[in-house]
Amino acid sequence: MSKSKSFKSLPLSEGQLNNLASIGYESMTEIQAASLPYSLEGTDLLAQAATGSGKTLAFGLPLVERLEPKRFCIQALVLCPTRELAGQVADELRKLARHPGNIKILSLCGGQPIGPQIGSLEHGAHIIVGTPGRIVDHLRKRTLDLSQVSTLVFDEADRMLDMGFQDDLDRILGQMPKDRQTLLFSATYPENIQALSKEYQRNPKEVRIAAKDPDISTIKHRAYQCDRTQMGQGTLAVLTSVMPESAIIFCNTKESCNQLGQELRSYGLKAGVLHGDMEQRDRDQVLIRFSNGTLRFLIATDVAARGLDIDSVDLVLNASLPGDSAVYTHRCGRTGRAGRKGQAISLVGAKDGFRLEKINTAVGLSLEAKPMPRPQINNVIKLQSNLRTIAISMGRKNKIRPGDIVGALTATKEIKGDQIGNITVQDFNSYVAVPRTLADRAVEILRQRPLKGKPARARKI
């Protein structure tokens, strides 16, 4: 089959081609060019593709193309290992579904109340994006009907199996028609993936795109001597010396994340903390505040940081040096993206010599841990964000769009459009970044002006 990089080489309608252009998709990535000719024909697909390779469009486009909007039933199911990934996939599918339009997409994930999900299902949907555990919950309650699904997608199937979802997957697939298209995307090809494909796919085409290591040639690497008991002071010294606009600070454990966050706050530095023990709402809000600039620093474990897609990170700080060189490379790949230059700094304890030597050998570096710079306490105030995030109690389910929020905030002419930062609209809540000096007034305006004819609650977070 042709591997042309142009979307025009695919059997797509003019409307969808225009939609893709409006979203900003100009040419196909490797996984898209290799897989779409097969999947658009309705063929089952077993594809190897790394996170960030464009796989959502690779399975989303054939999924949307097969839909029949006038048949108001669940025609497609996308299974994801985590709530964060499911949310990203649902957002991307909504963009693709602008053509043909009138497509309803629901996200069903754990960590969120099941009641509103049941209510949404009663009104019907075309596409479900969800995590296996919550999908099984709905099947047990008989609130979800998968009997008319024509397309099933496993997104990051290897992670789902690693997380112990095999039994849930078996139960879900037992409720679906055997005559369907099944698209299986996995970053790796372990034996359990082959077994899953053999059991649930029919003569799949195989497409493998080798994962590429992040280009760390644009990153300046440094290391400083820092005892593990002095992690907070070391982090303070690095941040106040380098003065990054934004930084991801990696720790090896959840406990270290929490402790470091508390220490930085005691110095007057605000940093978001992200790890697996947090409630979903708290995780969402930390990520939103970091991505819109109201939090300049994010402290995270490697697992929690998976799937983060933020290009403008100036600094990666390894507050805990990883034992695996591949983890080091993956962490550093968070900076120096999209043609920018970045910095990667590691704090190296007395017992970390072997780890540093292992990283130097594997990555091709010659790092030596040098004495830690002195903290520049006078710079702490300069590292505070001048933005504040406002949470609004209405979202996509209330038909809210970013333009509605901009219109409300600028109606009194006290806040200008170019003063409004990033806007994030979720199913039941929305978030907007505004200058800190205007935050109180923004809350008042949003409380006084109805959105879509209904009053909304607004508060600073």
Image (spheres, rainbow, N blue to C red):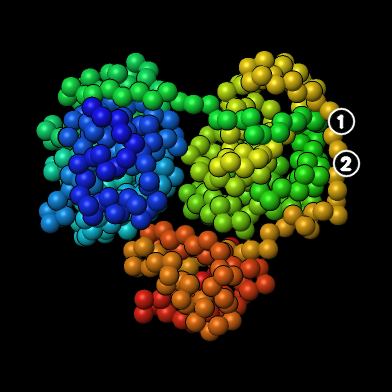
The quadrant where residue 115 appears: bottom left
- Determine whether the residue tagged by mark 1 lies in a helix, strand or loop: loop
Give percent across and percent down for residue 216. Answer: 62, 30
When the figure is inspected, residue 113 is found, relative to residue 319, above or below; the finding is below
Q: Quadrant of the N terminus?
A: top left
Q: CA distance from mark 1 to mark 2?
A: 9 Å
Asked whether 359 or 340 is in front, the reply is 340
The mark found on residue 374 in the picture is 2
Callout 1, which amino acid? Answer: Pro
Tag 1: Cα neighbours inside 10 Å, few (<14), some, or many (≥20)?
few
Q: Is residue 244 left or right of residue 93?
A: right
Residue at image location 74% in from the left, 54% down from the top: 383
Give percent across and percent down for residue 229. Answer: 79, 33
The mark found on residue 280 in the picture is none
Tag 2: Cα neighbours inside 10 Å, few (<14), some, or many (≥20)?
few
Residue at image location 38% in from the left, 46% down from the top: 26
Give percent across and percent down for residue 103. Answer: 23, 56
Residue at image location 88% in from the left, 41% down from the top: 374
Residue placed under numbered mark 1 in the picture: 371
**Residue 161 seen in render:** no
**Residue 341 seen in render:** yes
